Image (spheres, grey):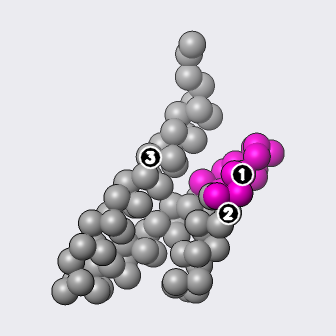
Amino acid sequence: MHETSNDVALSMLRERVRSARDEVALRRQDPGRRDDLGRAHLELRRSLEALVHELEQRRLPVPYALHAELRLHQDIDPR
């Protein structure tokens, strides 16, 4: 099956979220680098927002777990 540019864009956004999640998990293991953890949380929040926005723009369903994760990260860093 051939991927369209829209599929590639969604794949890239999903990969960005996965990468940001990995970075947050890595930073949590090193409590001496709180600034890095804060930046990692911010990147994850922005990545989640971008993915949710793209799904909504395309009128695709946004999984409840994705909404819940975004709310969690907005509560951590309400910027």
Q: In this view, does 72 lie above or below 69?
A: below
Q: Which amino acid does label 2 sit on?
A: His
Residue 17 visible? yes
Q: Which amino acid does label 3 sit on?
A: Glu
Q: Are marks 2 and 3 in contact (CB under 8 Å)?
A: no
User: Which residue in the structure is indicated by mark 1?
Assistant: 62
Residue 5 picture location, percent across and down: 57, 30
What is the secondary structure assignment of the residue under circle 1? loop
User: Which residue in the structure is indicated by mark 3?
Assistant: 15
Name the image quarter holding the C terminus.
bottom right
| Distance from Cα at disc 3 to Cα at disc 1 | 16 Å
Left or right: where 38 falls relative to 76:
left
Residue at 69% of width from left, 51% of height from top?
63
Residue 42 picture location, percent across and down: 45, 75
Q: In this view, does 12 lie above or below 45?
A: above
Residue 53 visible? no
Residue at 54% of width from left, 75% of height from top?
73
In the figure, residue 37 lies in which quadrant? bottom left
Residue 23 picture location, percent across and down: 32, 63
Q: Give the range drawn in magenta.
A: 51-65
Left or right: where 54 falls relative to 59:
left
Q: Give the mark, 3 or 1, whose residue is nearer the N terminus.
A: 3
Q: In front: 47, or 30?
A: 30
Q: In front: 38, or 63?
A: 63
Residue at 60% of width from left, 68% of height from top?
70
User: Which residue in the structure is indicated by mark 2?
Assistant: 67
Name the image quarter holding the N terminus.
top right
Mark 3 neighbour class, 10 Å CA radius: few under 14, some 14 to 19, many 20 or more: some
| Distance from Cα at disc 1 to Cα at disc 2 | 7 Å
